[in-house]
Image (spheres, grey):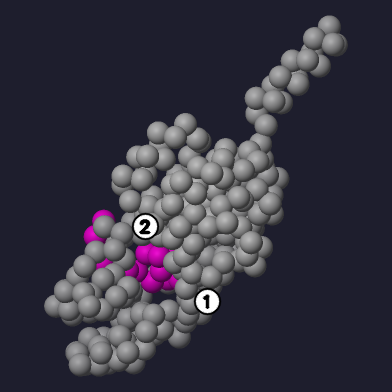
Amino acid sequence: MRAWLAMLLLVVAAQVSAVERVVSLAPSLSEIVVELGAADLLVGVLDGGERPSALANVPSVGRYGQLDMERLLSLKPDLILLWPGSVGPAQREQLQRLNIPVFVAEPHSLEQLTSQVETIARQLGRDDAGRQLAAQLRQRLADLRLRYYRAEPLRVFYQVWNQPLYTVGGGQIISDALGVCGARNVFDDLKLPAPQVSIESVLQRNPEVILAGDQAQLDAWKAWPQVAAVAAGHLLLVPDKGLERPSGQMLEAVARLCQVLAPGL
């Protein structure tokens, strides 16, 4: 009986063995793998911006929107981590037909991000690390919400680009980050991730703060002194690029955003 049970356990263990060769198709997903202490599993990454030092020697499978499918297949991955926006629709469909497990991650809130960190950890066989990191992220998120709570949220316009004028919609994780900081995205009623808007619509919604990643873009708003943000001098630079990468580090990027917004609270 004991021999039969031992054999059964070996079979089950083989069926649920952790993955060994992972390709990540987004810098944010690559960062999550590193944060989980599983960088050794990555055999290929999609490039986009500066890499973590732990991934300096990992082969590239292309850049955003330019996936090298032949290179990916040569690496023989047993798991692909995919953010849908990183590759085009045709290549996404091609990936689904490869008979290789694909985990799709596209968090729309910081709580979803935390849950996805746990799920990715399970995929990698790093359950304990996932639970520990998720617990830390949830505590940090709760602390930030409490510290920066505001009964009347600060109205914020988050500018992604100026020509044409783009912002973030209500279903985008950056919009949720603003909420954590006691603010409200003035275009949170728009469902597109990055909707194009007009200057007239910004004037109509009259934000109390305008955020952008470039000082010249902020200075251009001084042509409209009737906007509350311009009148108050609340034209603020986004503190860093961490808000654009939904990984564990994003919570600290949110903390820095909250600090930037705090004088207006």
Q: Is residue 10 visible?
A: yes
N-terminal-most mark, 2 or 1: 2
Which residue lies at the image location 47% right of the left edge and 80% below the top edge?
A: 239
Q: Looking at the picture, how far across and down is residue 84, in whole percent?
A: 38, 50
What's the distance in space between the residues labelled 2 and 1, CA to CA? 30 Å
Q: Looking at the picture, how far across and down is residue 232, in whole percent?
A: 32, 91
Q: Is residue 113 visible?
A: no
Look at the picture and state if 255 lies above or below 97: below
Give the number of the mark in front: 2 or 1: 2
Mark 2 and 1 residues: CB-CB less than 8 Å, in contact?
no
Disc number at residue 256?
1
List the single residue furthest toward the left. Answer: 200
Of 166 and 24, nearer the camera is 24
Q: Looking at the picture, how far across and down is residue 106, in whole percent?
A: 42, 51
Q: Looking at the picture, how far across and down is residue 53, in whole percent?
A: 65, 67
Of 20 and 155, nearer the camera is 20
Residue 178 image-quadrant placement: bottom left
Of 21 and 254, nearer the camera is 21
- Amino acid under label 2? Gly
Q: Quadrant of the N terminus?
A: top right
Q: Quadrant of the C terminus?
A: bottom left
In the image: residue 235, left or right of residue 254: left
At mark 2, the secondary structure is loop
Magenta stretch, residue numbers? 174-191
Look at the picture and state if 7 lies above or below 130: above
Residue linked to disc 2: 65
Of 159 and 123, nearer the camera is 123
Q: Residues within 10 Å of mark 1 (few under 14, many from 20)?
A: some
